[in-house]
Image: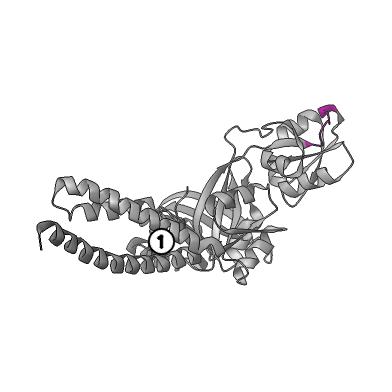
């Protein structure tokens, strides 16, 4: 056997071993995909991939071969992502509204390969995940102009789902009309209360009446179906395209940096992938200084509190629950110690989840 034959024999043996190892790696990727589906996590984890490349490259001594190894492992991870995407094609994600709604747009960005299921309101989308009809729900929790989305906050407090991921979506509210309608003909604008609030200045300026709809896309759908040219909808340009409407005015929202934060809700809490932010909800005992002491506990354990809100508890008159967002990981040792310390001052304490914002 000459040197060429010996080299090819070595390659054949290594290729056989690599085939077995490739299969083993992809079986592990199946488990990763299952975990991501259960917890509503993205397929791409840039931080994890960078660590894999860095750790693997250190094991290749030859500097020339190290460069080729990096390319090899990058291609391998690309195949793994493609395989995970294929496995997640059967994922069902709930959102409130219909095609063209901002929630539908956000869902497409978060879960491009999943089946997107529209529901008439926030609660029905949330319950669809609780009862197992869907794997995750994408719901708005806050707008930079109009504040929190109260209905979703209440579901977070009373329901059993966890938040494992968030997305900040820039929102442009446009005025949608039937083709050929002039602005002067409009008497009434319809939309979701959040959208109406974001565009309140322009609405007052024009003297338009307002009518609330469950979501922006359903408002656009109504305008498309009616013969009344005095009614316009405030919604997205995508909704205009979806329902055959014209955009009469763009960017009605008062703030040019108008952004809505959407949360991914799942039945399982993500405890394996560290988050940069954490959210929790609680009620405090009816005693002097209880809230102040609870806030002190959060800071004592190194959590930088970014948000503190109160919401009325509808079943108890003049009683409130509190929502906190803070920089830090609830599943870290400090996070667990903080939760134990908070329990001393809280009647009810609910960790909502750890997440990153994209």
Q: Is residue 113 magenta?
A: no
- Residue 21 in view: yes
Q: Is residue 179 magenta?
A: yes
Question: In the displayed image of the protein, which residue is found farthest to the bottom?
Answer: 131
- Residue neighbourhood size for the residue with mark 1, other residues' Cα within 10 Å, grouped as few (<14), some (14–19), many (≥20): many
Q: Nearer the viewer, residue 283 or 227?
A: 227
Question: In the displayed image of the protein, which residue is found farthest to the front?
Answer: 1
Residue at image point 39% right, 60% down: 273
Q: Which residue is the site of mark 1?
A: 330
> Taking 345 as reference, is 53 left or right?
left
Q: Is residue 130 above or below residue 166?
A: below
Q: Is residue 355 above or below residue 190?
A: below
> Taking 130 as reference, is 176 left or right?
right
Q: Nearer the viewer, residue 353 or 272?
A: 272
Start and end of the magenta stretch?
Answer: 177-184
Task: Answer with the quarter of the image where residue 203 lies.
Answer: top right
């Amino acid at each position: 056997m000459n040197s060429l034959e010996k080299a090819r024999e070595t390659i054949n043996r290594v290729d056989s071993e690599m085939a077995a190892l490739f299969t083993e790696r992809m079986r592990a990727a199946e488990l990763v995909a299952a975990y991501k589906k259960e917890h509503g996590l993205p397929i791409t984890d840039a931080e994890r991939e960078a660590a894999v490349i860095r750790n693997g490259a250190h094991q290749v001594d030859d500097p020339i071969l190290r460069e080729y190894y990096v390319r090899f492992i990058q291609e391998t991870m690309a195949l793994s992502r493609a395989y995970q995407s294929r496995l997640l094609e059967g994922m069902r994600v709930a959102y409130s509204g219909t095609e063209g709604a901002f929630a539908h747009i956000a869902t497409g960005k978060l879960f491009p390969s999943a089946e997107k299921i529209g529901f008439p309101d926030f609660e029905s989308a949330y319950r669809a995940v609780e009862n197992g009809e869907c794997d995750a729900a994408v719901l708005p929790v806050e707008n930079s102009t109009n504040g929190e989305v109260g209905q979703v906050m209440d579901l977070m407090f009373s329901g059993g789902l966890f938040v494992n991921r968030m997305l900040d979506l820039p929102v442009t509210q446009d005025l949608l009309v039937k083709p050929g309608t002039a602005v002067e003909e409009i008497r009434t604008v319809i939309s979701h209360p959040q959208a109406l609030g974001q565009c309140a200045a322009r609405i007052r300026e024009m003297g338009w009446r307002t009518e609330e709809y469950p979501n922006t896309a359903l408002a656009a759908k109504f305008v498309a179906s009616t013969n009344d040219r005095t009614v316009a909808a405030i919604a997205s340009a995508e909704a205009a395209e979806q329902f055959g409407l014209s955009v009469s005015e763009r960017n009605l929202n008062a703030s040019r940096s108008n952004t809505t934060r959407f949360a991914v809700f799942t039945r399982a809490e993500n405890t394996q992938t560290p988050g940069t932010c954490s959210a929790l909800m609680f009620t405090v005992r009816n005693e002097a200084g209880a809230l102040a002491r609870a806030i002190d506990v959060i800071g004592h354990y190194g959590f930088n509190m970014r948000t503190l809100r109160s919401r009325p508890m509808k079943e108890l008159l003049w009683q409130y629950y509190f929502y906190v967002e803070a920089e830090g990981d609830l599943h870290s040792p400090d996070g667990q110690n903080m939760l134990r310390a908070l329990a001393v001052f809280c009647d009810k304490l609910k960790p909502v989840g750890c997440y990153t914002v994209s």
